[in-house]
Amino acid sequence: MNKLQFFLKYLIYKIFAKHKGGNAIHSPFLFEFILDIVNEKVPYYAMDDIWNIRKDLLEDKRHITVTDFGAGSKVMKTSQRKIADITKHSGISEKYGELLFRAVVRYKPKTIVELGTSVGLGTMYLAMPNSKAQVHTIEGCPETADVAAENFYDMDIENITIHIGNIDTELPKILADLGQVDLVYFDGNHRCEPTLSYFTQCLEKAHDGTVFVFDDIHWSAEMEAAWATIKKHPRVKLTVDLFFTGYVFFRKALSKQDFVVHF
């Protein structure tokens, strides 16, 4: 998918996406999701702290050697990359990071798994709302993981465990040690087959209140195919497409529905 195609898809989304402000919503669960997570503007102190880390990273001129097991970057083509560039092009944006933060505040997951740590911004949005939650994050690149670990140390965050290695090998080991997962953030391999494989593995540990969050669901034709397959899974009850991210819910009390929500 080239840049023009992606831009046109985003333009269509912005024009036709509905339910901004929760209008015409018949599902109480979705209405609360839009009201309490999508539209909530309450500032949290930790968001400012993460913003300061982001600012420092965007000014970090150090170069590291990146090991990439996923689909790679559309922007950065060499293995030698500046930390500032990794932050700009691969780190979660402030808007979607704070959305993730509010989801953790709202649903209170105790066990969180993140596929793809990068420089750790997304991990901090997952970990800081609740210091008692356990966050397991997987990063394939040791040097990138070192940058993330520096950030966690600077922020005095102690509830994050970094697993360094390929998601294909690390995820089964993590899941084997967990009784269940409450939230999974998929941001480690933007290809169809691996995404569906990780989804299937994590699904075995999911329960009624589990939330899955998929990054970049329209990043490529492969990711759109993966998202379409996930929506059709019989255990999936409700999905919310926010264009750059997709939320998946499994609550049996919900009617099976798929929504595209303006964000």
Image (spheres, rainbow, N blue to C red):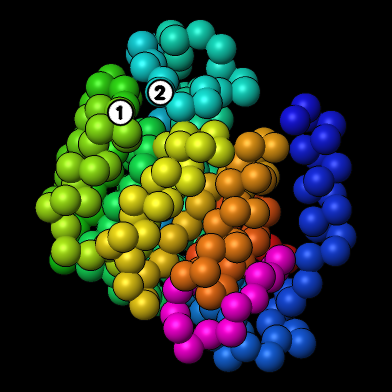
Mark yes or no: residue 65 visible.
Answer: yes
Q: Is residue 4 left or right of residue 88?
A: right
- The amino acid at mark 1 is Asn
- Indicate the quadrant containing the C terminus: top left, top right, bottom left or bottom right: bottom right
Label 2, on which residue? Answer: 69
| First to last magenta residue range | 249-261
Say above or below: 26 vs 162: below
Mark yes or no: residue 40 visible.
Answer: no
Give the main secondary structure of the magenta stretch: loop
The part of the image, by quadrant, that contains residue 259 is bottom right
| Separation of residues labelled 2 and 1 (CA atoms) | 7 Å
Residue 155: where, in percent of width, then height?
23, 46
Q: Is residue 251 magenta?
A: yes
Residue closer to the observer: 223 or 134 = 223
| Residue in view at x 34 percent, y 55 percent | 202
Q: Is residue 253 magenta?
A: yes
* Label 2: element kind: loop
| Residue in view at x 69 percent, y 37 percent | 221
| Residue in view at x 31 percent, y 60 percent | 204
Label 1, on which residue? Answer: 166
The answer to whether marks 2 and 1 mark residues whose Cβ atoms lie closer than 8 Å is yes
Residue 157: where, in percent of width, then height?
19, 50
Residue closer to the observer: 237 or 241 = 237
Mark 1, Cα crowd under 10 Å, few <14 / some 14-19 / many 20+, is: some
Q: Is residue 158 left or right of residue 140?
A: left
- Indicate the quadrant containing the N terminus: top left, top right, bottom left or bottom right: top right
